[in-house]
Image: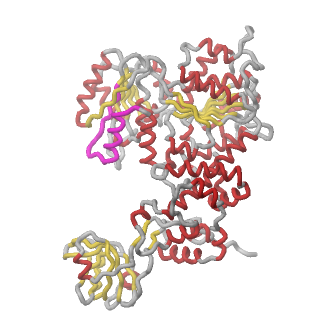
Amino acid sequence: MTTKRPPTVLEKMGLNSPMALALHLPSRYEDETELFTIEEALGLGRFHSIQTQGIVIRNQVTFRPRRQLLVTIEDNTASLQLRFLNFYPSQQKQMAVGSHIRVRGEIREGYQGAEIVHPTVRAVIPEAPLPASLTPVYPASAGISQTMIRKAVLKALQDASLKESLAEFLPSTLMGEILPKNDWPPLQDAITYLHQPPADANTQSLLERTHPAWRRVQFEELLAQQISLKRAHAIRRERRAPSFVKGQQVSKANKKNVSIEEGLIKILPFELTSAQARVWSEIGCDLSNTFPMNRLLQGDVGSGKTVIAALAAARAMDHGYQAAIMAPTEILAEQHYLKMQEWFGSLGVKIAWLSGSLKAKEKRLAQEMIESGEAQLIIGTHALIQDKVSFTKLGLAVIDEQHRFGVRQRLEIQQRVGSELFYCHQLMMSATPIPRTLAMTYYADLDVSVIDELPPGRKPIATKVVKATRRDEVIGGLHDWLVKGLQAYWVCPLIEESEVLQLQTAVESFEQLTQALPNFKVGLVHGRLKSEEKAAVMAAFKANEIQLLVATTVIEVGVDVPNAALMVIEHAERFGYAQIHQLRGRVGRGSADSVCILMYAEPLSMAAKERLQTLRETSDGFVIAERDLSLRGPGELLGAKQSGDAMLRFVDLQRDAWLIELAQKAAERLLAEHADLVERHLERWLGSRTEFLKA
């Protein structure tokens, strides 16, 4: 019986083939092509990264002020001290007195003169030749040395199979027509160059990834992604889905022969804005198709996305199909449930509520309602995509705040609701606008609708930035606010004291504000409360039985209290762009002028200062989303970090945005004119990750 060999450390990193190693490109380079005497190195001045060599004349472990290894080397011009604060016995042995070593690092001023702290060290003979190319430094995990990766990459580059893997098969005519005049090298040359750039290479363009060799690699990777997304778009149009055409309803809401959709429109206490009407027309058109809708509905906080979801659900139910609305948090899902009860209750629609916190019996009853088809509208959290939930005839899935679910979960619900016969329509909603560059790369399979106006009566929110030292002044202003009969939120980043982040906590703030405002009722809500306790506090706040609500970010989405027009956010420097934008959207829902106070503690980092400044100056969700993208990158905004799959490895969406359109054009041409080359290109770049990019 043969036992399976355990994976090597390189294989654990996914470096299990010549192609994988070839595409494991350096993150930076060290210049070991130039060698200075010690005297020349010292003459260059401090903080220069240099390479020099010499004989070890001293090797000593000292214990003051802490355990460290001090090594002195000399050549025939001068001497230099090396300091190691962390070291292994093997290093101490490598630098024994009399050894000849070559070192690289930054010269700094130490306790006893010039020194290098933790230099790179190699034992060499004095006449050892210098490398002809820059030395690559690779991304690595614990237990893998740069030497090990360099040897493996060098061996891979010499592997005969790599020539075929990196062969040029993109038609030169297509490349010439679509790409601008450029000096991009062939792919194999580009990859070899990036692993072994010559000594005179433009290191700045290599580090910034704007070098022609990088551009060739980035274009190829983007091309594979765009092909994958366009194919997914085409495949979706070949799938069957139920067609929901207005006027062809099969179920009526009551004896007067009125459809659920018509009944809903009649009982709504407002008319749709022109933006809402336009978006509903786009979605209605999608629902009438015989292939599944895959649409993203974007709209700022309070723009009225929920009513569009309700209209879509009504149309699905009118045709005898179930509709499901899924939200990432229980508090948001519950808000949807209450709103849908209010709208659909009088129309005889059976609504099921499903969340993780339900008791076993309640959960089982809800699951039975869903499976039997008694439940026409199902609302809940991610509990809706668990194995025990079986829909009878699901025609529409609405996923709110879709970026919070992660790519895998969106794919999961799509696979679950699909069958050999039909797939359900999907409507994804987000109050966090998707930046254009992100939409072009990761959402190319989605049709996008935007509600770009707020309902009448919604007033702009004034945002003020205030130091935490003015806390008492803020509380005084809060008192004057509450005296007018208005309500307010006070948002904190933590629930209880943290030794790492000494921030004001929700519990402390609640106690302090209760004491400072004895004439007003102060409530507290946070993620650790039981759902019924949370619901009771929120209901009391909505009924104005509580005037001031102290909360953590559980109120970020789903809370609608028009009389609450003031929000104070403590330690605003600890929140991200999207969080503050979402939180701020909880106010400005009534007739009163609304204010959001961002209270911060000093010292502020440059990033936090810029973030607060941007939030004070603009409430434009798209501007904020672009800044958020540049700060956090696409992985976090998409929820992709949850999935563990790699996103684009070599492309920066801000820096390389101009390449995306070129890749889109090339993908269209390849699919239309060179279908035989498509599979080869996808296999080279994505392998098994093509499914991930369809999500």
Q: Position of residue 99 (x, y in %)?
A: 35, 89
Residue 97 found in image quarter: bottom left
Q: Position of residue 91 (x, y in %)?
A: 38, 81
Toward the viewer: 96 or 363?
A: 96
In this picture the colour scheme is secondary structure
Toward the viewer: 11 or 500?
A: 11
Q: Position of residue 362 (x, y in %)?
A: 65, 29
Residue 675 found in image quarter: bottom right
Toward the viewer: 379 or 316?
A: 316
In the displayed image of the protein, which residue is found farthest to the top?
256
Is residue 229 shown above or below 318?
A: below
Compared across the picture, whether 636 is left or right of 507 comes to right
Toward the viewer: 545 or 399?
A: 399
Is residue 432 shown above or below 248?
A: below
Compared across the picture, whether 344 is left or right of 536 comes to right
Q: Is residue 329 visible?
A: yes
Q: What range is drawn magenta here? A: 595-619
Quadrant where the C terminus is found in the figure: top right
In the displayed image of the protein, which residue is found farthest to the right?
421
Q: State how many labels appear.
A: 0
Q: Residue at x 44, y 42 (%)?
A: 626
Whether residue 618 is in magenta: the answer is: yes
Quadrant where the N terminus is found in the figure: bottom right
Q: Residue at x 67, y 22 (%)?
A: 314
Q: Residue at x 38, y 22 (%)?
A: 565
Whether residue 178 is in magenta: the answer is: no
Residue 44 found in image quarter: bottom left
Q: Position of residue 318 (x, y in %)?
A: 72, 21
Q: Is residue 355 visible?
A: no
